[in-house]
Image (cartoon, rainbow, N blue to C red):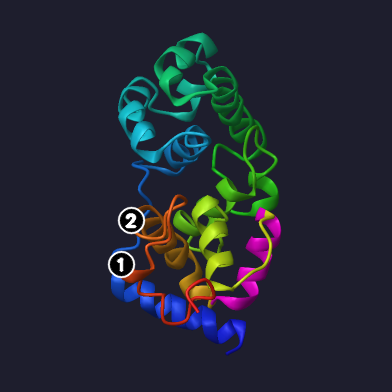
Amino acid sequence: MTKKELALKAVEALKKEYPDATCSLVASNPFELLVATRLSAQCTDARVNLVTPALFEKYKSLEDYASAEIADVEEIIRSCGFYKMKAADIVNMAKKIIADFDSTVPDNIEDLTSLPGVGRKTANLICGDVYHKPAVVADTHLIRISNRIGLVETKDPVKVELNLKKLLPPEESNDFCHRVVLHGRAVCTARKANCENCPLSGFCKKKI
């Protein structure tokens, strides 16, 4: 079986297992999703979703964030970890989007990664979920599971992203990444690959 065939099998198996492929971060506009994704670094999505309601209630526009006192943002997001750096990034992201991108969250990897604190993982999430462009979000679940089933042989996030972009159907890549996250939390966890309950076990390299 080629890697492309393996990828198609994984896409179909996870689509059947997790028909609803959605991002677990709660946001009502592109900048809120950008903020939530920044907060999710070294933090669980569940924790972020507990923190963001107060943040989004206080700051409703890009201008609100750009004029915010960083210390005030720090206080709200403290429980997300690395809160000083994240607060500064959030305020400075807003300033740069207003100054350089006409108050619109960019729709491409290059411009998104020019924003403070935004790496390729976050940029791909925005491109995929907001602008519905083919994207691969190389988070820890995708890296782990792609290696386990034999789609890639690297733990470098950029290499995983680029390799999977060659293997996955473009129209399936965004949803596939969300489904892998769900699968990585529920079945194929970092602690244990629960192969007996896994829809990928019939063709998984680790199982075979």
Q: Is residue 55 left or right of residue 94?
A: left
Q: CA gap, disc 1 to disc 2?
A: 11 Å
The answer to which of 77 and 33 lies nearer the viewer is: 77
In the rendered image, residue 158 lying in the magenta stretch gets the answer yes
| Quadrant (top left, top right, bottom left, bottom right) of the N terminus | bottom right
Query: On the image, which quarter does residue 99 sit in?
Result: top right
> Residue 34: within the magenta?
no
Task: Mark 2: give few (<14), some (14-19) or many (20+) Cα within 10 Å.
Answer: few
First of labels 1, 2 by sequence position = 1
Q: Main secondary structure of the magenta part?
A: helix
Q: Is residue 181 above or below residue 13?
A: above
Q: Is residue 113 above or below residue 169?
A: above
Locate residue 30 relative to residue 136 in the image: left or right: left
- The disc placed on residue 186 is 2
Magenta highlight range: 157-168
Residue at (49% x, 82% y) in the render = 8
Task: Bin the neighbour count of mark 1 within 10 Å (Cα to Cα): few under 14, some 14-19, many 20 and up.
Answer: some
Foreground residue among 14 and 49 = 14
